[in-house]
Image (cartoon, coloured by chain):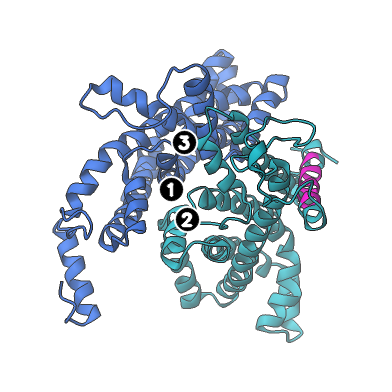
Chain colours: A blue, B cyan
Amino acid sequence: MGFDQPPFWRYLAWVGRFALGDLGTSYTYSVPVSELIGERAGVSIPLALMAITLSTAIAIPVGVAAAAWRGRPADAGIMGVTQIGVAMPNFWLGILLVLLFSVRLAWFPASGFAGWGGGVLQGLRSLLLPALALALPQAAILSRVTRSAVLETLGEDYVRTARAKGLGPAAALWRHAVPNALIPVVTILGLQFSFLLAGTVIIENVFTLPGLGRLMFQAIAQRDLIVVQDLVVLLAGSVIVVNFAVDLLYAALDPRLRHRGAA
Amino acid sequence: MKPSLAIGATLTGLLIGVALLSLVWTPYSPTAIDILHKLAPPNAAHWLGSDSLGRDVLSMIMAGARNSIAVSVIAVAVGAGIGIPLGCLAASRGGWVDQAVMRTTDLAFAFPALLTAVMITALAGPGATNAMLAIGIFNIPVFTRVARGAALSVLQRDFVMAARAVGKTGWAIVTGDVLPNIAAVLLVQMTIQFALGIIADAGLSYVGLGTQPPAPSWGRMLNDAQTYIFRAPLLAVFPGAAITLAVLGLNLLGDGLRDRLDPRLRGR
């Protein structure tokens, strides 16, 4: 293991191997860490993607609706519900979803993962409740951001111009106000990704899903430090990659930003 | 007073009141085991029922409030105590000091906070003290950024130039002129981090890394309750409701204070 080498040299050797894709061998499982992580990522990545998709699909219509109904009871109601959503810890929401859908209604499994072997639908079914538990608190934050961003653009001159040239309120909202409000929404979405990763760690424990979060806990409990180290580097790395992707997305969303660098 | 501020202040007052009350009185001892009356539904003797060892749920929630507050308050104190001076230093010195401090906070933000708190408590040993430190460490860059941003805008104001003109320098300006003017922003941030601390503490103790038994904690209660979810579903409801109400109260209080303290947002 090279324990006779100086720490700095061992560190460099580890970085070098990491860069080449050799993550080392797990002390407890005696299999390559890359294999372990690859297997567990098959649960965590679909879970994170489902959660992001659900939260966006819920938050944007809700936020836009609240902005369109500004000051009316519907707006106040939506804002009240989102305020509670922000305050709920996602693992408690997970337990409540289990209470309702698994204990009362018995529609979904209370825990565990069916695996992808039994078909994609079976796998998605066991991920739906955890994904919802992750997505709803995020959606609460995101819809508040969407609402205030849309309110901001609704006050702009170009929206008034669009209305003045005869566009209906719905068309002015969706064609002009919403696309211009997306930048702050995407920023928050990117920031939420790191919360989502951490949330996955706890949610996987609520639903006993064999994902990266559970692997992390098992590795910590068994002092399988090489696995912990690789996981932390990979997760931090993915946060950086997502933030970079968000920066690139700005250019796609706002053509003005595309020319700034070129000019 | 706006309703959100009133509700927030009431809920936060209730939280602190319950925690203080639990120091002198709880209906039962929160650690008293009464195995004959385990998993009882809410009744006259146990208002919120009893858990798998027959402990009184209301007493545990009251005592849990105390632990939750202690962890988050100390985590905020650690974050603010180190973060605010760093942010002020970065703002007032500028140059490479500013660059060094801000790039370090960028680095800290790349690590998902809760995840690293999990790692710190797991490696340093589970327990309330390490949970406080782990959450506190992640409050540092937050306070650094907020303090720096607020201090930068204050440093450009005329009264700071006047202070310089009469010969005040460095820390005298920061403590005498800048801090009083950014205190409101920092206070709002403290309520937000306080709320996040309660959620983080609950998460850590849910996975067994926070406050250790027999000291009651809300996260731990949820974990225990999950085992008996088919027999006593209400056990999983009360501690979560306590967390949500506490966080909701602090968030509303923070929002309300911001609206009140920042004249530009008034009337929005």
Taking the view exactly as shown, the residue that stands out farthest to the front is B36
On the rendered structure, is A222 left or right of A27? right
Visible in this render: residue B147? no
Q: CA distance from mark 3 to mark 1?
A: 10 Å
Is B10 included in the stretch rendered in magenta?
yes
Q: In this orientation, which residue lies closer to the viewer: B170 or B161? A: B170
The span shown in magenta is B7-18
Residue sitting at x 81%, y 43%: B10
Image position, residue B83 (x, y; %) = 58, 68
Mark 1 belongs to which amino acid? Ala
- Quarter-of-image position of residue A49: top left
C-beta proximity under 8 Å, tags 1 and 2: yes
Q: Residues within 10 Å of mark 1 (few under 14, many from 20)?
A: many
Residue sitting at x 55%, y 28%: B231
The residue tagged 2 is B113
Determine which of the numbered discs, if any, sits on residue A198 in the image.
Answer: 1
Position of residue A113 relative to residue B12, above or below, is above
Q: Earlier in the sequence, mark 3 or mark 1?
A: 3
